[in-house]
Image (tube, coloured by chain):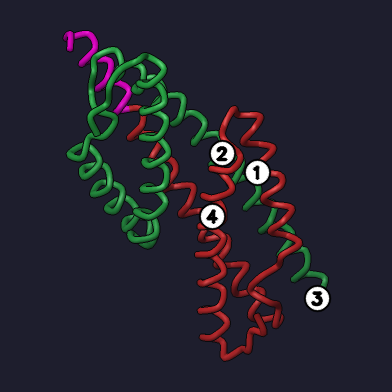
Chain colours: A red, B green
Amino acid sequence: MSDIATAQLSSYRDTIDNLDAALVSILAERFKCTTAVGFLKAENNLSAVDEAREGRQLERLRKLAEDAKLDGDFIEMVMKSIIAEVVKRHRQIASEFGKVITR
Amino acid sequence: MSDIATAQLSSYRDTIDNLDAALVSILAERFKCTTAVGFLKAENNLSAVDEAREGRQLERLRKLAEDAKLDGDFIEMVMKSIIAEVVKRHRQIASEFGKVITR
């Protein structure tokens, strides 16, 4: 591998590391926001899961992914793991409030 | 649920939708960058997988996640799915170049 190729690889990896730090920051902010939603839901006895909202989110994200030339199935898989983690936390919050979540 | 709570929920959801659009954009940029890495690796007959680099990435991201009060295991799970998708694409690129990838 030439010195130029080695420098190129190193530069790409620096960019990937910067983008990953941005991903972590955005995910941290997203979980702050979904925690606030979890408290609001617990206070108002709302279910941790809202399938209609989830369906709309996934449809919109698939469209955004395709516009950005990303694989829609891949984005859907990533978002489903994020949403599953959010639902788990909403149930924990409800349980701390002593609320009964029906689903 | 009061009108104020309904308005709060709607505002939180708008923020979540904005953050999700940012996530998709950053992931699109990340895949553009890893595709460039894939071409560089194929040109130079490098393996699609670099376990030492992956180990360093995951360790750094776990630290960033903990600093941002995120669950390290959750971030590791998300990053592992992203890296698996990247490796799949690197193998596809190498195969288009007619290169043999040993692992």
Magenta-drawn stretch contains A12: yes
Q: What chain does mark 1 sit on?
A: A
Q: Earlier in the sequence, mark 1 or mark 4?
A: 4
CA separation in Å, label 3 and label 4:
24 Å
In percent of width and height, residue B79 lies at: 38, 47
Amino acid under disc 3:
Ser
Q: Which mark is residue A30?
A: 4
Q: Which mark is residue A61?
A: 1
Q: Residues within 10 Å of mark 4 (few under 14, many from 20)?
A: many
Please determine whether, in this image, residue B47 is positioned above or below residue A45. Answer: above
Say what secondary structure mark 2 lies in. helix
Please determine whether, in this image, residue A45 is positioned above or below residue A1. Answer: below
Q: Would you say the residues marked 1 and 3 are in contact, meaning their CB atoms lie under 8 Å apart? A: no
Q: Would you say the residues marked 2 and 1 are in contact, meaning their CB atoms lie under 8 Å apart? A: yes
Say what secondary structure mark 4 lies in. helix
Amino acid under disc 1:
Leu
Task: Identify the residue under disc 2.
Answer: B24
Task: Name the image quarter holding the C terminus of chain B.
Answer: top left
Q: Which mark is residue B2?
A: 3
Q: Would you say the residues marked 1 and 4 are in contact, meaning their CB atoms lie under 8 Å apart? A: no
> Same chain for marks 1 and 4?
yes
CA separation in Å, label 1 and label 3:
29 Å
**Magenta extent:** A1-14
Amino acid under disc 2:
Val
Figure quadrant of residue B36: top left
> Same chain for marks 2 and 1?
no
> Same chain for marks 1 and 3?
no
Say what secondary structure mark 1 lies in. helix
Q: What chain does mark 4 sit on?
A: A
Q: Residue at x 17, y 9 (%)?
A: A3
